[in-house]
Image (cartoon, rainbow, N blue to C red):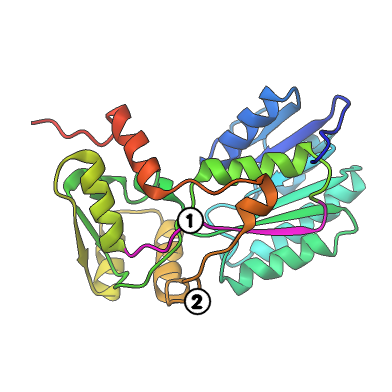
Amino acid sequence: MTRTSSGKKTTLVIGGTGKTGKRVAERLAAAGRSVRIGSRSSVPAFDWDREEGWNAALDGVSSIYITYSPDLAMPGATDAIRALVWRAKLQGVERLVLLSGRGEKEAQACEQIVQDSGLEWTIVRASWFNQNFSEGAFIEMVLSGAITLPAGDTPEPFVDVDDIADVAAAAILEDGHDGEIYEVTGPRLMTMAEIAAELSAATGREIAYIDVPHDGFIEELTGSGAPEDVVWMLDYLFSTVLDGRNAHLTDGVERALGRRPKDFADYARQVAATGLWRVAA
């Protein structure tokens, strides 16, 4: 049994308006933790591209939840993480919790920077998010009834961001998580065809999976006006990470929380019940 730490402390949640960040912030606030949202629109602002403003965001902070958008595999991420860790130490920060990605050597280089910081640290190394289909790049595909991706039949253990947020919040609020790498996955491996089948069952309408050539997918994505960094990230993920290297389950959620992770079918039913995927007749 872990012990929740006492005392009024402040946590900086970098990416506090994003998929995991907003959920981590909500959990910390519900536990009585003082939360500072780290985003370009917050006051004080936190912008990865404006290091001169970081000291204000870090002032009085005891712990940081670190997400790097769009991905730690992006060029320049290691330099940014190194600079943040250096400033965090100068400002008296005690604990770092880093959201990382499975099977990404660049992300693991960022992990090493955090591990070598001399501060207390926890790594949350995640597989692909369930919420990519409801809050991310693939929601329009679900609404259109066709998931058109260059994923072949490679299985991936999609993880729910609520589980990620629960693990990250526990690492900040509780003792017993220092020095842990929690590699978090869902409870089963799923191909995109199986994802489409679960979405069809949850929505009550046919959602197909159509495997498309990688180059054609990236060309169409670029032509659609998608942001450059999003195009880069999806190109990298589908050409590099989704090659079978992550086609196995891990026990990170169980080790951190003492329970099983949420299944994709439960996620799909919950989102469908909100009406988010409902298509007008």
Residue at 71% over, 30% down: 36
Q: Position of residue 37 (x, y in %)?
A: 66, 32
Mark 1 crowdedness (10 Å alpha carbons): few <14, some 14-19, many ≥20: some
The magenta span reads 178-191
> Magenta segment, principal secondary structure?
loop
Asked if the magenta segment contains residue 185, the reply would be yes
Q: Nearer the viewer, mark 2 or mark 1?
A: 1
Tell me whether the residue at label 2 lies in contact with that at label 1, contact meaning CB atoms closer than 8 angstroms: no
Residue 26 lies left or right of residue 79; in this view the side is left
Q: Secondary structure at mark 2?
A: loop
How far is mark 2 from mark 1, CA to CA?
17 Å
Q: To which residue does mark 2 refer? A: 245
In the image, residue 270 above or below residue 182: above
Residue 254: image location, x then y, percent: 63, 52
Classify residue 194 by image quadrant: bottom left
**Residue under label 1:** 187
| Residue 60 location, quadrant | top right
Give the residue type that dot 2 points to. Answer: Arg
| Residue found at x 40% / y 54% | 227
Amino acid type of the residue that numbered disc 1 sits on in the rendered structure: Pro
Q: In the displayed structure, does residue 267 sit left or right of residue 80?
A: left
Relative to 163, residue 245 above or below: below
Quarter that holds the N terminus: top right
Q: Judge by depth and name the residue closer to the eye, 233 or 210.
A: 210
Q: Residue 138: image x %, image y %?
A: 32, 51
Q: Residue furthest left?
A: 281
